[in-house]
Image: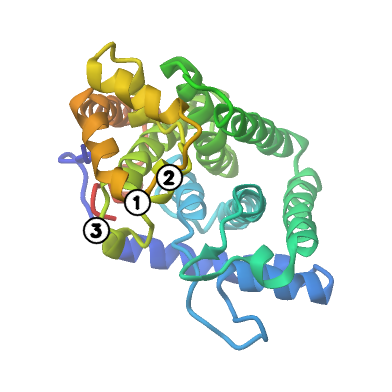
Amino acid sequence: MMLTATTYETRPVDEILENCRRLFEPAYRAAVATMPAEIARIAGYHIGWWDEIGRPTTLGGKAIRPAFAFTTAAAMSDGTLSRVQDRAALAAVAVELVHDFSLLHDDVMDRDYTRRHRASAWAQFGVARAILTGDLFMTIATDMLAANDVAAAQILTRALRALCRGQNSDLNFEQHQKVSIRQCMLMIEGKTAALLSAACELGAWASEASHTRMHLMRRFGMRVGVAYQMIDDLLGIWGDPQATGKSVSSDLMRRKQSLPVVAAMNSGTKAGDELARRYGDSRPIREFELAHLADLIETAGGRRWTERAACRNCEAAQQLLTEARPEPKAAADLLALTALITRRDR
C-alpha cells in the first residue's frame, strides 16, 4: 500500500516535516495573531499551542497539508525553496487555516467532545465561540490569497466549496439506509481530498509551474487524499487506539457510512445484507455488538475492497507525480509524506 521511490534519494519523513514546520509555524502564528485576542486564544487552544488558560503545550498536529504545499513547491522548481519560500508559506498557511476551520466545525456538527485527548474547542469554550473561530480561520485564509493572487484564492475557494459539499453529503448519509459506492467516493473527494489537492496545486502555483503541471499536482493531491481517507476509514474500524489516538467504536456506534461499510452493504452478500439491516434498525448499537459488525464488514468484503482501492489510488498518485516531471529529491519527499499518511499503523 505504501508508495515507493526506488529511483529517488530518500530522507526520514520526520526530517521533512520538521523542515516544513520550521518554515511554516512562524507564518501561521502571525496569521492567528491578527485575530481578536479572545478568538486567537481559542484558535491557539484548538491548534494545540496552549491550554485553556494560555499555558504552552505541545499538542499540535503534524501539519501534513502545509508539508505537501512546501514540498510540492520544491518539487515543481529546482528542489529548493529559497526562491519561492514566501509564496509557499502563503499557500501552506492558507490551507492549514481552512483545515482548522473544517475541524472546528466538524467537531460541533459531530458533537465530538475530544480532540488530541482533551476537550474540543466547542466543549471547552462553547459552540458559538468555536463557530466564530472557525469562520475567522476561513476568512483570513481567503483574504491572504486574494490579496496576492486572485487565481490562488480561486484554487482555495474551489476546495472550500467541495469540502462543504462533501460535509453535507456526509451528514445526509446519516439519514440514508443505503449509500452507493459512487456517492461515498464523491463525498470523500470533497470532504477530505479536496483540501489536500488544493495544497498540492497551491504548492505548484507557488513555484510558478505551468498550468499543466499545476493540474497534474492537483490530481496527485486528490488521489493521495482519497487513499488517506480510505485508510482512515479502515483504522476507524480495525485500528489500534494506542497507535492512532482514535476510538474504534464511535464510527460504528454512530452508524457512520464509511467506505468499508458502504462497500460491504453493496456487496450482495448475506453478511452485507445483515449489516444493512442492523444499520437500518432504530435500536442503539451497543458496544458488545461492535466486533460482530466489524466481522460482517470483513466477511462481506468491505475491508479488502477498501484496501485494494487505496492501493489503486496510491499507484495513480505516483503516476501523476511522474508525469509532472518533479525535481527528484523533492519528489522523494512527496512520496515519503504520502507513505506516512497511507500506512496502516499511524
Residue picked out by circle 2: 253
Residue picked out by circle 3: 11
Kind of residue sitting beneath label 3: Arg
Q: Is residue 37 visible?
A: yes
Kind of residue sitting beneath label 2: Met
When the figure is inspected, residue 118 is found, relative to residue 248, above or below; the finding is below
- Nearer the observer, 258 or 21: 258
Mark 1 residue crowding within 10 angstroms, few (<14) / some (14–19) / many (20+): few
Pointer 1 or 2: first along the chain: 2
Q: Position of residue 114 (x, y in %)?
A: 53, 64
300 sits to left or right of 53: left
Q: Quadrant of the rendered structure where residue 224 is? A: top left
Q: Position of residue 103 (x, y in %)?
A: 60, 53
When the figure is inspected, residue 126 is found, relative to residue 286, above or below; the finding is below
The residue shown at (28%, 65%) is 242
When the figure is inspected, residue 276 is found, relative to residue 130, above or below; the finding is above
Q: Position of residue 181 (x, y in %)?
A: 41, 18
Pointer 1 or 3: first along the chain: 3
Kind of element beneath mark 1: helix
The residue shown at (59%, 48%) is 110
Of tags 1 and 3, the one toward the viewer is 1
**On residue 287, which mark appears?**
1
Task: Assess whether mark 3 and mark 1 are in contact (beta carbons under 8 angstroms).
Answer: no
Q: Quadrant of the C terminus?
A: bottom left
